[in-house]
Each structure stands twice: as structure tokens, then as C-alpha cells.
Amino acid sequence: MSEQEALFRYTLRMGDNSLVLGHRNSEWCGHGPVLEEDIAQANIALDLIGQARNYLTYAGEVEAKFRPSALPTGQAGPLRTEDDLAYLRGEREYINVQLVELPKGDYARTIVRSFLFDAFHLPLQQALTTSKDERLKGIAEKAVKEVTYHLRHSSEWLVRFGDGTEESHRRAQEALDDLWRYTGELFTPDEAEEVLAKAGIAPKLADVKQEWSATVDRVLKEATLKRPADGWMASGGKKGIHTEHLGPMLAEMQTLQRSYPGVEW
Amino acid sequence: MYKISLRERVPSTTLATRNTFPYIMPDSQQESLFQQKVDAEQKIEPRDWMPDGYRKNLVRQISQHAHSEIVGMLPEGNWITRAPSLRRKTILLAKVQDEAGHGLYLYSAAETLGTGRDEMVDQLLSGAAKYSSIFNYPTLTWADIGAIGWLVDGAAIMNQVMLCRTSYGPYARAMVRICKEESFHQRQGYDILITLSKGTPEQKAMAQDALDRWWWPSLMMFGPSDKDSPHSAQSLKWKIKRQSNDELRQIFIDRTVSQAEFLGLKIPDPKLKWNEATQHYDWGEIDWTEFNEVIRGNGPCNAERMAARRKAHADGAWVREAALAYAGKKSKRNAA
Ligand SMILES: [Fe+2]
Ligand SMILES: [Fe+2]
């Protein structure tokens, strides 16, 4: 895999992860457990969708450089825009990790999922601030501030749940036990990630995992929650093999673009 | 950073008596001083003496306003997951988030009058408190998101600009912040319709259909006509309101007609016509039966809106309890 192609897949994945999680978090808007959380979740979703826009725009530009002829037929313009990539790819072409596409569930599930992702996302973005790729570096510099807040938000709530009432503790532990099997995929590099790690453009996922693991241990301890044992891990998202939940989510998200092809909104 | 229902509830009598003058002044005298202050355009502040009716009227109006912001998140929230581009999605999500923020400011303003947020929320969920009827209409197409920004936020702004000069200080100040954001909302909504009206015939039809459905409900947002408005006269005297329902409605119509023309859309009122003599538009008649039915709970989405709010509140109960329990444990630990 060429470095350009790896960079395309990498930026696409970063965009997909942020977009799908942002979409899931935005589902809370108007339905949160307390008004302040509607606002917080909307904030986080806005950050994530903003990141996705940066990554997808970049992905389109990278793709046009190494694969100018790969454009789907009938499509105007020389390169795929953020919206082409967000709205006109099907679920087999999305390459986000499965963790982010799972339904939002109750608030414990939402918080646990966010926490598991944020604890990975922060060291990843921190590492990307030293990327040899200027564009990735620039995106990461802004994202680090945002993701720092995301991790603080999800950690604080996880501690409240773990060390709150019996019910909140039970819900948080259940969500944690359930979601644990989706964490393996975060740290299993695909070819693109390996190529970019060698080139000094992206970090080694093993390094990111160390920090993730330390954060998880620290917060779970404070939350009086038990870290699940590493058992069988789900995977496939990075290759476009998803859970059954992504398809309906995309169908909803893409409905207007698909129903009225090629028009301006 | 995080504030939950731990806040103290201050009974209204405490606030009212805390600030009485050092000598006993009869209520009638207090009231005339109060009215002088209002007439002189001085703001009434939380610790000032105020007639009970003024306090009650304000709590009713501000909390109703807060509830409207919150319930109003639902019809627009209906399109967050389906917004047709990432830019539109971002704008819509930020807008709905603003509305949540408006709800927060307003609940805080009402709390300065001695009624706690929990109590106000309970009144909403029990059906005792009202919210703006406009949010009982469904958002059926993407164009509705444009129409809401343009017409609903537009009508709300008329009211809110007036309320920036309302006599109660905390309410007026909340309004100044809110108004800035509302005018963004209106422009963004209008921008959606500009794009649609320049688009395909299907998109244009979508825009016209939205205007057809939202026009009359938007006019109803200004409330009953002056002759039937139960709270209006007193509110005007106390300068809680500064302009009557009918005055504001007329200004709104006068302003909106040319905006519809610019979009190439037709306002669904055959009687709408410029009147040279009055320098205003003449227009048809609001269907007051519909207006009253929707207020009574028989609008297309009343039940859904309340069900959604009640569900969010009930589903969130364990979350709020956990936050309280944790805060309690923490303060105990800190004290030890
Ligand atoms: Fe608002
Ligand atoms: Fe608004």
C-alpha cells in the first residue's frame, strides 16, 4: 500500500470514527437526563462532527492525488467532498471501529462508550500533533483541546455512576462488561496504520494502548468499577464489516442526499 | 461546573420580605412607589419590593418561555440526524443547543423570583404549565427546519426584542443575550429556504409547502387578539410587555411579506393586501378554533411532545440521583 493510499484510508477512518460517534451523541439532543447534559452532548457532537469535516475534506483531497480516476460515475467535480464521503458511501465503505456505531443505549452506555473511545482518542490526537504530515498535525492541535474536554466529561460521569447509587453502579458495570469486547479493534493496526506509523505520520497503536490502559485503570479505580478481562474481541469495522447498527444509522443520515441525488441543500 | 437540583429552593416569601424597607410601609404606598419606578423605566431587581401579582405574572411568563425553549428542541431535533449536509447538521445542532441554553438562562431568571427549576419542570410535565403552541406542529420535511428558523424564530424575536426592555431586570438581561442568538437562527432558517427556492422544482415545492403549513401557526404565536387577551392590560401597565399582541403581529406580517416575495413563495392568505391608507398589510383571519384546540392539548403533536419530555425526565431520574448521591459522598469525604 502506497503512503498516499494509506493516508487516504487513515484520514477516512479518523473522519468516520468522529462522524459516527458525533451522530450517536447528537441523538441525545432534546432527550438528555438533565438539561446541562443535552448541552454537553451537543457540544461534544459538534466537536466530533467538526473533526470529521476536517478529516473527510482532507481524505477527498488525498484521494484525488493518487486515484484521480476512482470517482464514481456521474459525479460532478474532480474530488469527493466531505459530503460526498459522508452521505454517498454505504456501510461497507465506512471504515470506523464498531465501538462508535453501537446504539446510544441508556446514559450509562453512552458514557462508558464515550469514555472508552475518549481515553483512546486523546493520546492518539496528542501523538498526531507531532505528525510529519502538516495537515494531520494542524487538525490534531485543535482536536486535542476538544478531546481533553470529552475525556474529562466522560470520566467525571463514569465516576459519578460507579460511585453514585447501586443502580448507577450496576448500569455502568453492565455497559462496561458489554462494550469491552469492542475495545480490541481500537488497537489492532490495519495496513494503513502500519505504513503511516513507519513513516512517522501516525503513532504506533501499541503506544496509544499503553496510555489508554493507564487511563482506564485510573478512572475505573476511582469509579469503583471492575476492569473486565480481555476475552474474545469483535473486529471488522476497519475493513468495512460492521454490526447491524450502522446500516440503519446511515440510512437515516443519508436519506435526503439519497432521495434527491445531486442537488444543493 | 456541573449544577444539578442541589440548589436551594428559596420560598417566595423570603425574597419578598428580605428587602422590605426598614420601616413598615403600607402595601398601597409600596405599590405606588413600585409603579413610579416602572414608569420611570427603572429596572425592578430581585430584592426590590414588588406586587404579588407582578411576581406571579412574571414567573408564569418566564417559565412558560423557558418551557417553550425546551419543548422547541423536539421538532427541530427531529431533523438533526437527517440534516442533508455536514454544514447544515452542524448549524442545526448548534441551534438546538442554543435553545437549550436559552431554557437555562430563563429558568435562572425565573429562579430569582423564588420558584425553583425542579418545581417549574414538574409543572410542565404535569401539564399545569403551558409552552408555546407552535411546537405542537410536526416537522415533516427539511424545509420545515428553514420555515421554523425564518418564521418561528422570527416571530419569537419580535417578542424578545420587546422583552429586552421589560421592567424586570434579570428577564431583560437574559433577553439581550438570547436575542443575539435568535437573529442568527432566523438568518440560518431563511438561508435554508433561499437554497431550496433556488433549487429543483421539488425543493421549491417543499419550501412552499412548509410556508403553507407554518404561516398561520406562526401568526398565532403572538397570542390571542388584544380584545381577548386576559393578561395583556396589566402586563402593559407593569411594562412586563411593551407592545400588544396585535401590534407585534402586524409588524411581523409587514416585515415578512417582502421576505416571502424574495423567495418567490406565496403566503397562504388570499386576503393579504397592502393598504396605502394604513401603511400596513391587511390580512385574513386567524382560525381561533384551531388556536384554542391546540392550547387545550388537541394539536397534532401535543401528546408526543409531552411524552418525549416525560420520558427524558423519567429515564434520567437514576442519572440525577447518581449525581446527587455522588456529590453527597464527596462532600462528606471532603469534610472528613
Ligand atoms: Fe430560543
Ligand atoms: Fe431560536
Image (cartoon, coloured by chain):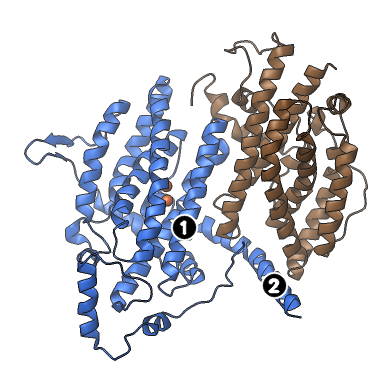
- Name the residue located 66 percent from the left edge and 63 percent from the top edge: B319
- Foreground pick, A265 / B16: B16
What amino acid is labelled 1 in the image? Answer: Gly
Position of residue A110 measured from the top left corner of the image (x, y, whole percent): 70, 51
Q: Please identify the quadrant where the C terminus of chain B is shown.
A: bottom right
Query: Are there few (<14), some (14-19), or many (20+) residues within 10 Å of tag 2?
Result: some
Furthest-left residue in this view: B277
Q: Mark 2 or mark 1, which has the lower sequence index?
A: 1
- Name the residue located 25 percent from the left edge and 85 percent from the top edge: B27
- Does the image show residue A259? yes
- Foreground pick, B257 / A245: B257
What amino acid is labelled 2 in the image? Answer: Ala
Query: Which residue position is annotated with label 1?
Result: B103
From this view, report whether residue B99 is shown above or below residue A157.
above
Furthest-top residue in this view: A69
> For this view, does B40 lie left or right of residue B200?
left
Circle 1 sits in a helix, a strand or a loop, which is it? helix
Furthest-bottom residue in this view: B24
Q: Quadrant of residue A99?
A: top right
Chain for colour brown: A
Circle 2 sits in a helix, a strand or a loop, which is it? helix
Q: Please identify the quadrant where the N terminus of chain B is shown.
A: bottom right
Q: Which mark is residue B75?
A: none
- Name the residue located 60 percent from the left edge and 30 percent from the top edge: A254
Q: In which chain is the residue bearing label 2?
A: B
Instruction: Determine if the C-beta at disc 1 is less than 8 A from ligand 1.
Output: yes
Chain for colour blue: B
Query: Which residue position is annotated with label 2?
Result: B325
From this view, report whether residue B132 is shown above or below residue A170.
above
- Does the image show residue B136? no
- Between the residue at mark 2 and the residue at mark 1, the CA separation in whole angstroms equals 25 Å
